[in-house]
Amino acid sequence: MATEEDIAWFKSTFHSIPKPELPDDSVEYFIYHLPSPAPAVIDAAAETRARLLEVQRSAAELIKELLKDYIWQRDNFKLEIKKENGATFLNGRTNFGDSIEDEWVVVYILRELTKKHKDIWVKVVDSDGEFLLVEAAGTLPAWLEPEVADNRVWIHQGELCIIKPKQKGDKKITETLTLAEAKRIIQEEPDRFIKSTIIQEEAFYRLRNYPKQISENMHSAIVTIPRKVAYLLHQKPAYVSPAVEAFYIRDPVALRPLRGRNASDLIFPPDDLVNVSVRFTRVGYAQLKSQDFPAPPSWSGKLPDTTDREAYARAEAGMKLACGFEMLLSDPQNQDKAAVREMKFLLEDVATGDEELPSNEEIETWEKKEDDEQWMDISFEDLDRELKGKGKGKERSEGDGKFGDAAAQENLQRIVARFEEFLNDTSAGFEGADFINDYESDSDVDEDDDEELSSDGEDKDASFDEEEFSRMMKEMMGMPGSGQGPPLETPLRNRIKELDAEEGEGADEMDDTEEIQELSRQMEAELRQTGVLDLNRKQQKISGDRSKGKAKATETSEDEYEDEDENVNINLAKNLLEALQGQGGTAGPAGNLLSMMNLRMPKDDRP
């Protein structure tokens, strides 16, 4: 018979099942009905359910209005009513694959829903957690670390709301929030929210061009495909996404049906080809075009000659798309997908005669739309020109080397602007930009720290003169300077002068300085004799005895020391060039240093 200890041990072996982690490339969203203050109604659950059904209907209308012709990369936006821990809410999950824009379409729909329904609160996360905070990382308060961010970020009435912690002061915030606590704060403590315009603008920056940008996420192209594929895409254009993905992530098992030479064994044989306009997601079209995919044996001789570039490009893209459909419907691992089942039903109707394939006359009535592919053309030269701010004016007006589309240019300019803003931030320390304390005034600065700062706010012990540094680097590179300031001297002599200025009192100290100078001159003579200071000298034959060499060194005149600056310049230039060569074309200290001085070195094309 089991004892109490055995029963206690048996119970201890049971643990709560952890909540599964959100898969990569997925976004999950929750909609709660949380009126403030909490209503005193008898049947609050029924009221909440009725309000959530209204939100669900509004979402369907919004999708029909804004996303009528939208194609999702993988999953679409969907909301389901769920009940968990006694709470009823709307929940959805969208796998956006490689299309980040799909994630932001979801955020836009959720934000619009909060504008229409004033008493709902939205929480949205992805595999990175609170990704809206990631977008606004440069503007967040210092206490808002990822460890304490869960359940603090909400969207309400189109605004971003962040719940502040109770803990105040300079100590690190360790207070975490559960979902139940966050919901209670929403209804009972509305003053606990941070509503910052700056944070909100950064968090929703990608939505600045919505809803116009929704249509710009699509790309239409004319391709040459089998008539069966054209029929399926005309029935439902969204079938293109799973087909492109099947082509993009193909494996040897998926390619097996395409290895045969008999085209009659294929579901989509390349016998009856037509030109149609197909709408892709931009990511999907780029995946299709970027892949090097030789035509399978069954497509041999079906592609036109490469002399007609336009016809060949359309036929090649159509061949890849048709192969994607073939792999999608033939691979056993795809048989449970809803899109695959639907396509097989449609093809069965064609095979039994219940439906007919579109005729050439009917296809001619279909829309023929073909978008410009310029957004895919981004070269290294264009990127380099944009980073240097030279992609404007005449160069831009002449149309030579345009950099992507307007969105790409705007994003790049924003990155550069944010970087320049950081560099110009005088409050930034070695760990990054400092932020104003959320609970204290930014004017509360330690008086001891003020004493160590000069009148212009500069640290006296760690000051840095940018103009002096630039002048020194130009002189070391042998470039003409500004003509101001003393000539460059060796580091050793500079240090001697500093010692002389700091300790220039007393005869004994002067004698020590003179002795150091004399030792310096002797060391330079010895180093020059060995050739260390003259790396550019020609190779000389070593002959004679050591006495002759010593005599030659003794006869060295003071005029030769005047060439010291030139030798140092040459040595520095050689070292920089060797460092550049050692980088092998990648980023490194030498290249970064030269780029800071606006010096662009030519590429090393030597084998």
Image (cartoon, rainbow, N blue to C red):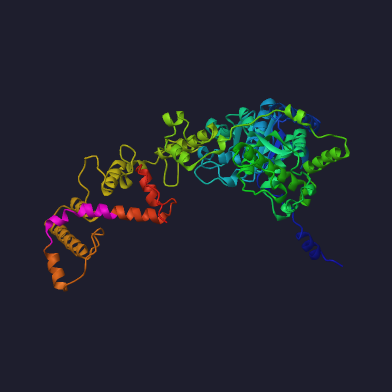
- Is 345 contained in the magenta span? no
**For this view, does 401 lie left or right of residue 544?**
right
At horizontal 47% and vertical 40% (from top left) the residue drawn is: 383
Q: Quadrant of residue 41?
A: top right
**For this view, does 577 lie left or right of residue 265?**
left
At horizontal 16% and vertical 56% (from top left) the residue drawn is: 561
Span highlighted in magenta in the image: 556-571
Which quadrant would the N terminus be assigned to in this image? bottom right
Q: How many marks?
A: 0
Which quadrant would the C terminus be assigned to in this image? bottom left
The answer to whether residue 86 shows anywhere in this view is no
Q: Relative to 502, say whether 125 is above or below.
A: above
**For this view, does 497 lie left or right of residue 109?**
left
Q: Position of residue 4 (x, y in %)?
A: 81, 64
Q: Relative to 90, say whether 553 is above or below.
A: below
Q: Name the main secondary structure of what is drawn in magenta.
A: helix
Q: Position of residue 315 (x, y in %)?
A: 66, 40
Which is nearer the eye, 173 or 422? 422
- Is 562 contained in the magenta span? yes
The answer to whether residue 536 shows anywhere in this view is yes
Q: Position of residue 28 (x, y in %)?
A: 69, 41
Q: Position of residue 323 (x, y in %)?
A: 71, 46
Q: Quadrant of residue 452?
A: top left
Which is nearer the eye, 584 or 364? 364
